[in-house]
Image (spheres, helix red, strand yellow):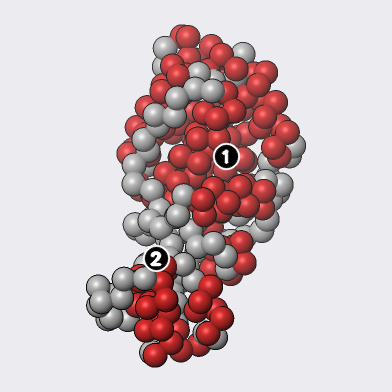
């Protein structure tokens, strides 16, 4: 019997979910973190976290695990820290609204991206407008470093809101790391943020017995070697791709 039974909360695409999902998958494929066909893999695209602990939770699946209340509690913890911080940092947020305003808007954005449904009206345009006009004074090395430090403190303090699923924290870290990298590129500041362990790479499991010769030949040398080794084959005697292909076809 599985330790978990997801979804614990009903999921739905929001205003931002699909675009952020596509952007992250494209980036993760380029960095070797997701298989090249991830845009078509149900396991990756689903808004529902897998019950299988060996499969990481993608951040657009977090709502299915956490639900709205836990997300609000984490965001509330963060903005309580923000509004208790140094004046140069607090003043940028205070000009926009009070602590409750920021909790509501940020929690809505998180829930929207994390698969909770259409919470964040305005989507990317609203988020971009906020950072370009309201928070531009913090979109730099100093502001990013302070934001990151407060968020790391928040995450450490909010373990109780992350359930007992050990995949939740890496999924949250991956979510934050993705957005911080996005902002660092857009606003040309150094991305030195470290939220903690990120989701591990997802490797496509290859079953040679269910593949055509053409499909096997289309695999990269690295994919062939890894898959053969997972099948208990010592690949040292097979130095080139043709050798690996021929061995795979024999299985």
In the rendered structure, which disc, 1 or 2, sits on the residue that comes first in sequence?
1
Q: Is residue 155 left or right of residue 88?
A: left
Quarter of the image where the N terminus is located: bottom left
Q: Is residue 128 above or below residue 161?
A: above
Q: Is residue 119 above or below residue 236?
A: above
Q: Is residue 222 above or below residue 29?
A: below
Q: Residue at x 41, y 72 (%)?
A: 241
The image quadrant that residue 115 belongs to is bottom right
Q: Mark 1: give few (<14), some (14-19) or many (20+) Cα within 10 Å.
A: many
Residue 243 image offset from top left, x and y in percent: 37, 78
Residue 14 image offset from top left, x and y in percent: 69, 50
* Residue in front for this viewpoint, 246 or 35: 246
Q: Where is mark 1, residue-wise?
A: 107
Work out whether residue 98 can be spotted. Answer: no
Q: Is residue 106 left or right of residue 75?
A: right
Q: Residue at x 45, y 25 (%)?
A: 190
Q: CA distance from mark 1 to mark 2?
A: 41 Å
Q: Where is mark 2, residue-wise?
A: 222
* Residue in front for this viewpoint, 117 or 243: 243
Residue 2 image offset from top left, x and y in percent: 39, 76
Q: Secondary structure at mark 2?
A: helix
């Amino acid at each position: 019997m599985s330790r978990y039974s997801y979804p614990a909360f009903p999921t739905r695409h929001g205003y931002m979910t699909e675009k952020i999902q596509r952007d992250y998958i494209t980036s993760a494929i380029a960095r070797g973190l997701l298989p090249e066909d991830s845009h078509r893999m149900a396991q990756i695209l689903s808004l529902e976290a897998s019950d299988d602990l060996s499969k990481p939770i993608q951040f657009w699946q977090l709502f299915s695990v956490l639900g709205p209340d836990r997300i609000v509690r984490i965001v509330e913890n963060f903005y309580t820290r923000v509004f208790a911080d140094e004046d140069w940092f607090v003043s940028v947020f205070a000009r926009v609204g009070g602590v409750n305003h920021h909790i509501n808007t940020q929690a809505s954005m998180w829930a929207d991206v994390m698969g909770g449904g259409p919470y964040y009206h305005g989507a990317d345009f609203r988020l971009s407008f906020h950072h370009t006009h309201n928070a531009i004074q913090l979109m730099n090395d100093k502001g990013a470093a302070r934001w990151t430090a407060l968020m790391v403190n928040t995450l450490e303090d909010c373990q109780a809101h992350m359930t007992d699923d050990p995949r939740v924290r890496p999924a949250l870290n991956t979510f934050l790391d993705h957005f911080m990298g996005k902002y660092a590129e857009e606003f040309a500041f150094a991305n030195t943020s470290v939220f903690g362990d990120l989701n591990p790479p997802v490797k496509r499991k290859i079953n040679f017995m269910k593949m055509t010769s053409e499909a096997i030949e289309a695999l990269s040398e690295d994919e062939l070697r890894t898959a053969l080794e997972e099948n208990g084959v010592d690949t040292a005697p097979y130095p080139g791709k043709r050798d690996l292909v021929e061995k795979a076809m024999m299985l």
